[in-house]
Amino acid sequence: MTQADRDWLVTLRKTKKRLITQPQAAEELGVSVRHVRRLVNALKKRGDKAVIHGLRGKPSNQRIGKSVEEEAIQILSADLYKGFGPTLASEYLADKHDIEVSKETVRQWMIGAKLWRVKEQKVTAVHVWRPRRSRVGELVQWDTSEHDWLEGRGERLYLIAMIDDATSRLFARFVRHDTTEENMKLLKSYVEKFGRPLAFYTDKAAIFQTAEKRKRDEPGVDKDPVEMPPTQIGRALQELGIAWIAAHSPQAKGRVERNFGTAQDRLVKGMRVAGAKTLEEANQYLEETYLVWWERELTVAPANSDDAHRPLDKSHSLEASLSHVEMRQVRNDYTIPLNAELYQIEREAVVSGLRKANVRVEKRLDGTIAVRFGERYLPVSRCIAAAKTKALPVKQAAPRRPANKQRGSDWFRNFDLKKGPKTWQVA
């Protein structure tokens, strides 16, 4: 008999002696008055055993038969199922052998038969769970996953994903290379469809952050950090009024990381069944099937129904911001050098102060070149390189005659100072 049973017995004895009423006993025990009346009658007939359940210590009527357990253990002991965990083993027992039991029951069976070893759970650090943002568009996590998405059926692809923190709404696309240009294309599609979010949450990859260059043996702890110029994507986010937040660990942006874990399992198998072999087929399955399933099954409603996305205003230009921008100096002939090529500014666009001035050169996503001086764009055209003329042969100079070592007078050839007379003799 447990201590709880003893407490119940004290209350029932007081009720039997009419020291307290049955409603008072029911309130004290947290049961109905009818159940208290039933227990008091059982106390009169069976004594103190009335508070002990009749099935205590006996096997449950819902217990699975011993023969079923022995059959399952015999099946899982075969080499075919070697290394199976309890979850996968329970699925195969139900699908292949019509033995439907829970994974926890299979776990206990496998532990008893020494087919599964219990792993000790070691908690090294407690992770503080961060709550979701309240509105859609407040924070969007952005990352890229490199994986064999087509399982060798086609070229190697990268999956760039953007997932909303408040709703888990997913926006993704397969690309051939994880470059600044491909990430800008996805960013452009996102802004055109949903608007400008308040902030993007990414890792510290080189396309998002310019790292400070230091010597390998330089400590760098006592040195103050140097403010580095933004990357092309960082500049574009600043121009669009979107904040950028850097994650210090993969666990910090766990929502997009768990999305990749699901995609590497379900998305890969779905494309295998669909027979996707190319980039176009992979993106078609992603947009028409996988993202539809994700939107239906895994998205949640935000705590606040307001949308934090902001539309583009007149001061914003997606084509200008989402481009490769460099500053160039105009030459005296009103040409601009860019990538080993020259671009000529049209004569009608030449204004005072343009020569030797710095202009902004934008190489846009569609491949065009735009040059901005101040607040206006200048029409430019690519200069065609002139044909190289054939160089004239250089006339070689006549070889020089070797120098004569015996040039000049030779009157002193036989003159010897040591054999001559002394100075005082000459005097």
Image: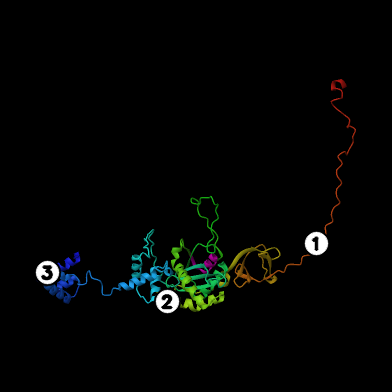
Which quarter of the figure is the C terminus placed in? top right
Residue at (61, 63) in percent of width and height: 327
Q: Give the residue at the far bottom of this rendering.
A: 288
Question: Nearer the N terminus, badge 1 or badge 3?
Answer: 3
Residue 89 located within the stretch drawn in magenta: no
Instruction: Report the span colored magenta.
Output: 233-244
Q: Quadrant of residue 367?
A: bottom right
At label 2, the amino acid type is Glu
Question: Nearer the N terminus, badge 2 or badge 1?
Answer: 2
Question: Nearer the N terminus, badge 3 or badge 2?
Answer: 3
Q: Is residue 286 visible?
A: no
Q: Quadrant of residue 31?
A: bottom left
Residue 215 picture location, percent across and down: 55, 52
In this image, 33 relative to 304: left or right?
A: left
At label 1, the amino acid type is Ala
Query: Badge 1 is on which residue?
Result: 391
Query: Badge 3 is on which residue?
Result: 14
The answer to which of 421 and 99 lies nearer the viewer is 99
